[in-house]
Amino acid sequence: MLVEYIQKALEKAEYKRLDDGTWFAEITGFEGVWSNGKTVEECRRELVEVLEEWLILKLRDGDPIPEIGGNRININEVAVA
């Protein structure tokens, strides 16, 4: 489920080559999720790491996580016996 969600989010990523020759990427709708790298692949790898960390923080804090392509991450409380 998480891998599918991340893959769908990455499909929305927008990449730009900057004037200094590096690459910048961001995912619309995911505030603060962006990366920069010397190559597109380096930029993409960093973007995956940033997205994973962003998701962990959202889950920890109970913040809403956007739905992507029908994929949704829900947290259900479990009662401890």
Image (cartoon, rainbow, N blue to C red):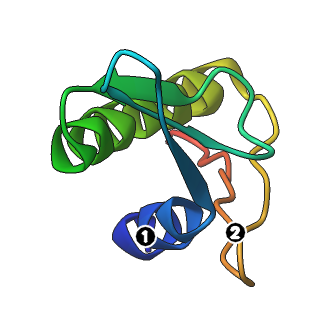
Spatial CA distance of label 2 from label 1 is: 12 Å
* Left or right: 61 as drawn, with respect to 48: right
The quadrant where residue 68 appears? bottom right
Residue at 30%, 46% (x, y): give it.
Answer: 44
> In the image shown, does 77 or 10 lie closer to the viewer?
10
Q: Position of residue 43 (x, y in %)?
A: 29, 37
Q: Nearer the viewer, residue 19 or 34?
A: 19
Q: Residue at x 30, y 34 (%)?
A: 49
Determine which residue is flagged by label 1.
Answer: 7
Foreground: 49 or 1?
A: 49
Residue type pointed to by label 2: Arg
In x, y percent, where is residue 42?
17, 38
- Residue pointed to by mark 2: 72
Circle 1: element type: helix
Q: Is residue 15 above or below residue 1?
A: above
In percent of the image, x 66 and y 45: which residue is there? 77
Residue type for callout 1: Gln
